[in-house]
Image (cartoon, rainbow, N blue to C red):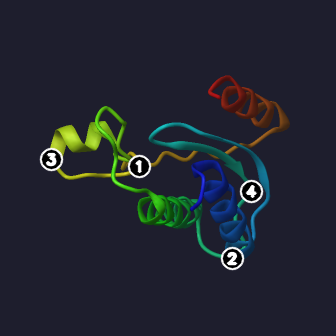
């Protein structure tokens, strides 16, 4: 069985290897992730995020026994409330081009403040 942190780090390493990007920083939140990465050699930032989220959610759903009463499910409450269907991660994805060392520091500081 994977711990959720181990599953994420393992999936992140696989995605880094597959798409060829540098990882500057990240933080995993209950329903989303913040990543500060370089442009990938293959694909786009959207491809990276999609692949990462898919790998993590599949692993954690497969490794998780049935939830006990009162235990939080691996589901985005926002999506479930809107559609009634279970969703592991928030659906939306926002990217931002970091164009200077100052912006990189700003974004990395933001990531650190979200842990």
Q: Horizontal and vertical percent for residue 83?
A: 16, 47
- Residue 38: which disc? 4
Residue occupying image coordinates x 58% and y 66%: 44
* First along the sequence among labels 4 and 1: 4
Kindly indicate the quadrant of the structure image that contains residue 40.
bottom right
Q: Are marks 3 and 4 in contact (CB under 8 Å)?
A: no
Q: Nearer the viewer, residue 3 or 28?
A: 3
Dot 3 or dot 4: first in sequence order is 4
Residue 84 is labelled as 3
On screen, 17 above or below 86?
A: below
Disc 1 and disc 3 in contact, CB within 8 angstroms:
no
**Secondary structure at numbered mark 4:** loop
Q: Residue 42: image x %, image y %?
A: 66, 76
Q: Residue 14, how many percent across, how many down? A: 68, 70
In this view, the mark in front (2 or 1) = 1
Comparing marks 3 and 4, which lies closer to the viewer? Answer: 3
Give the distance between the C-alpha atoms of the residues marked 4 and 1, in whole angstroms: 22 Å
Q: CA distance from mark 2 to mark 1?
A: 21 Å
Camera-near label (2 vs 4) is 2
Name the residue carrying label 2.
18
């Amino acid at each position: 069985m994977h711990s959720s942190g181990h599953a994420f780090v393992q999936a992140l390493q696989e995605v880094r290897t597959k798409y060829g990007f540098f990882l500057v920083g990240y933080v995993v939140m209950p329903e989303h992730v913040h990543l500060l990465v370089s442009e990938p050699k293959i694909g786009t930032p959207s491809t990276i995020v999609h692949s990462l989220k898919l790998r993590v959610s599949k692993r954690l759903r497969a490794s998780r026994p049935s939830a006990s009463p009162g235990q939080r499910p691996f589901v985005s409450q926002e999506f479930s409330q809107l559609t009634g269907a279970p969703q592991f991660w928030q659906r939306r994805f926002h990217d931002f081009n970091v164009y200077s060392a100052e912006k990189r520091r700003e974004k990395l500081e933001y990531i650190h403040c979200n842990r």
